[in-house]
Image: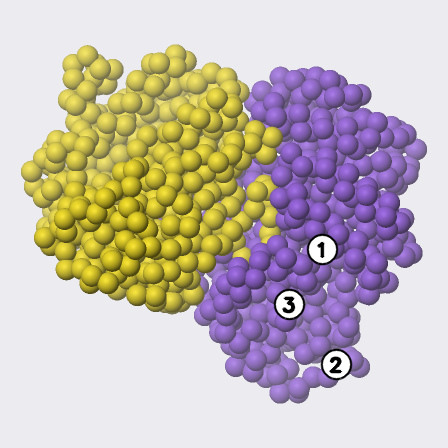
Chain colours: A yellow, B purple
Amino acid sequence: MDSPASPGAPHPETTRPAGVVARLQAALPGRVDVSPTALEAARADRSGHRSPAVPLAVVHAASVADVQAVCRLAHETRTPLVTRGAGTGLAGGAVAGAGEVVLDVMGMDRILEVSPADRVAVVEPGILNGALNAALAEHGLWWAPDPASKDISTVGGNIAMNAGGLLCAKYGVTREAVLGLDVVLADGTLMRLGHRTVKGVTGFDLTALMIGSEGTLGVIVGATLSLRPAVRGTQVTLGGFFPDVVAGAAAAEAVTNAGHVPALMELMDEVTLAAVRAYAGPERGAALPESGAFLLVQADGAGAEEDGAAMADLMRAHGGDVTVTADHAEGEALLALRRTAFPALERLGTPLVEDVAVPRSRMAEMFARIRDIEARTGIPIPTTAHAGDGNLHPILLFGAAAQVGGAAEDATSIPADVWEAAGELFRAGLELGGTLTGEHGVGLLKRAFLRDELGDAQHALQAKIKAVFDPHGILNPGKVFTP
Amino acid sequence: MDSPASPGAPHPETTRPAGVVARLQAALPGRVDVSPTALEAARADRSGHRSPAVPLAVVHAASVADVQAVCRLAHETRTPLVTRGAGTGLAGGAVAGAGEVVLDVMGMDRILEVSPADRVAVVEPGILNGALNAALAEHGLWWAPDPASKDISTVGGNIAMNAGGLLCAKYGVTREAVLGLDVVLADGTLMRLGHRTVKGVTGFDLTALMIGSEGTLGVIVGATLSLRPAVRGTQVTLGGFFPDVVAGAAAAEAVTNAGHVPALMELMDEVTLAAVRAYAGPERGAALPESGAFLLVQADGAGAEEDGAAMADLMRAHGGDVTVTADHAEGEALLALRRTAFPALERLGTPLVEDVAVPRSRMAEMFARIRDIEARTGIPIPTTAHAGDGNLHPILLFGAAAQVGGAAEDATSIPADVWEAAGELFRAGLELGGTLTGEHGVGLLKRAFLRDELGDAQHALQAKIKAVFDPHGILNPGKVFTP
């Protein structure tokens, strides 16, 4: 998708007002793609959701000026615009449908600057998180946001979603790693938000407002990122096996209560552990026990060995069978197994991936609620958790096994009973003082529940802010907010 | 100011529409203060600025309901409202004048909850930062925002200004330490923003938007704070003496470039160092050299000793005469000297405290620019810097020495040439890729320069956002934005 596409034959499903696409083609020659392949691809993301029809066109933007031209035209013609990076979202936020134009920013993937002295990088939105971090490593630097998708997701997408990941309890979410943003507004205005400095308090923090706005307030065309020095010292990895997930959650809570801040703390429940073990095969899977739950903890930086030993003691005191390794490769192998949880579970059925986050102290309760919903509905809900920050991913399984690595073709219409169970999950999370999405965003899949969390007054206030940025409502309409 | 005041005799300068104050008194019996002392106090903050006339009244709010009642009445009658905590601001943000009502939230100072398991505290806005941290220490916890005023400034004020301080390069600014806010909007609506969880991405990040909004978007009536475990291990303090401040700045840059993240790194220039030495007296001042500049560096947590030794080597390689101590009391004594910089300089003249921040790599250049402005204008501009994050405090001295610890009575009208020099400072900061205020806020004193930094388009956008929250413009009018 990096090279400009030639206009192809129109997709049969397209009902395209010739005017808009023709004007786009005239304004951005060679960049407007109406090939069936491109239009089909833009209907889906990694959530399993697929829009009912293909969009009008995909514009492969190569510059800020391209983005501005598209926005101006869309603004003038009231054409809905869906900004899209790698399409790895899990909430349908970048899914495009009938009458919409896709603004593909994957071609804007340059690293414009790396400054070790200022500890910043200036990048375009389409660069992959993993590619950026590979380049930064040469400078002994690191951009901390660490979504599980980091090798295939873009920095712009990470910012648009305020991506989380495995390291947030210690290293923060994406919002803490962005100093400034260049944004094209709906009407084509380019605006430079934020600062290049560590501190800066001039006016409202529009950088923070833009982070996590899921393409509804503007198009991110550049970012000034706050970097960290690469972590030094030993990395200590603890693998803890517990009889059940509630025991594992209690151990995780004990680690937090004792004042530790592990780099990561990941909890897999019984069904997930079994699926990961099967997926890994006999050799790699032998590192995992045959039953029970698994708590993976990592300490890094100075003092990691002492910290690791103390956390291992706490886990043992909570009934865990704990192995400790300071071997980097062994630790990474355990972590790699954790990262296969999603594809491993996709073998068992079509997944609806949820993302509820609760206060750390309520995590064990949330697991109990999930078990209860599972028992009442009969829907399997294997669950993993970022146990350091209380973010759980209950995965509701239904229908046939999905194709591993591809969008779930048969997930277009999620069965009513699965939705109902998901609704129960959200409500349980809210009752425990949590939120319906910790890191995946609202997109299409959670918008029906947003008002329940925000309340009517805040929901209305947010809609008014949206209108300030995008008076005609052309930016990612129908996402986040119910139309 | 904690106890409700009885209505006193009206202040002679007050030109008060009897209606508003009478209605406030009827709605909030015993809480409406029109005593000359209270009205006089509300005219000033710690910036040295004093409004030309006293406000109408000071309402000592004791509850969320009180705040809502005041907002509803102000909204209805279009009465300007200035929210005020401890009045320690340095930009005139909480200074109240003719026709305005002051909403004093110092009486709302309870800690509602401390949860070690969730690592959060829920507090009212009037609690002092220092008092909160004293209470948290009993739980082994810590709220990281560390403005120099922490013993006398409120948590609500820290949030309203997005306060910085000495520890930001390592521990972040206030924005990174707040999970959620309860806010009363201009029309009296109570809104609960944000989350209790580490992660949460439901809708726009209005918590972040509110942080640093300087009382112009809403009244903060409650906050859910993100806590850290108290730092463990040794604290190592380095005192580095350099022939001049440019050499000190170069050493600070070398420390950052080598990948260190000191807890704090404070640079005092020659004039500041001499003033601090004189202020301390012969005994305490003996810890400081008789001339040159001073770079104070502290490492904490695991690995502090190794880090400290490595940083000391770097400083020596850059011409520093460095002492290293792992003795807590010795380190704190040096830090206490640093904290006297402001009162020490007040002895030399009336201060206009500036707050420019530049990218770390431009700090030495900014010092050179300040020297140049000083030489051309003849105005002394002693400067300290948070050298870990590039935030400088040039202090323009004019007129007679101020009363130490009190508002500078004679600073009401800052001389034109001082303003002009301040304007040159701001422009130099912007030219170096910086911002006109790193942590003090815009308030009254920097509003004339805000548009230069934001540009017209962003300035207009920010004003529209303000209007969404506060359609009648009653919240802190004239602050941040030029009327």
Closer to the camera, B139 or A77?
A77
Q: Earlier in the sequence, mark 3 or mark 2?
A: 2
Q: Position of residue A56 (x, y in %)?
A: 21, 55
What is the secondary structure assignment of the residue under circle 2? loop
Residue B192: % across, % down: 43, 60
Tell me which numbered mark, 2 or 1, is placed earlier along the sequence: 2
Numbered badge on residue B482 = 3
Which chain contains the residue that carries disc 2? B
Image quadrant holding the C terminus of chain A, namely bottom left
Whole-number angstrom distance, CA of label 1 to CA of label 3: 18 Å
Identify residue for label 1: B90
Residue A159 image point, x, y percent: 40, 44
Same chain? Circles 3 and 2 = yes
Dot 1 or dot 3: first in sequence order is: 1
Give the left or right position of residue A390, taking residue A118 as reference.
left
Labels 3 and 2 touching (C-beta < 8 A): no
Which residue shows up at 77% across the image and 73% down it? Answer: B52
Please give left or right for residue A294 compared with residue B343 in the image.
left
Helix or strand or loop: what does disc 3 sit on?
loop
Q: Which amino acid, by three-letter code, is at mark 1?
A: Leu
- The residue lying at 57 percent from left, 80 percent from top is B78
| Chain of the residue under label 1 | B
Q: CA distance from mark 2 to mark 1?
A: 25 Å
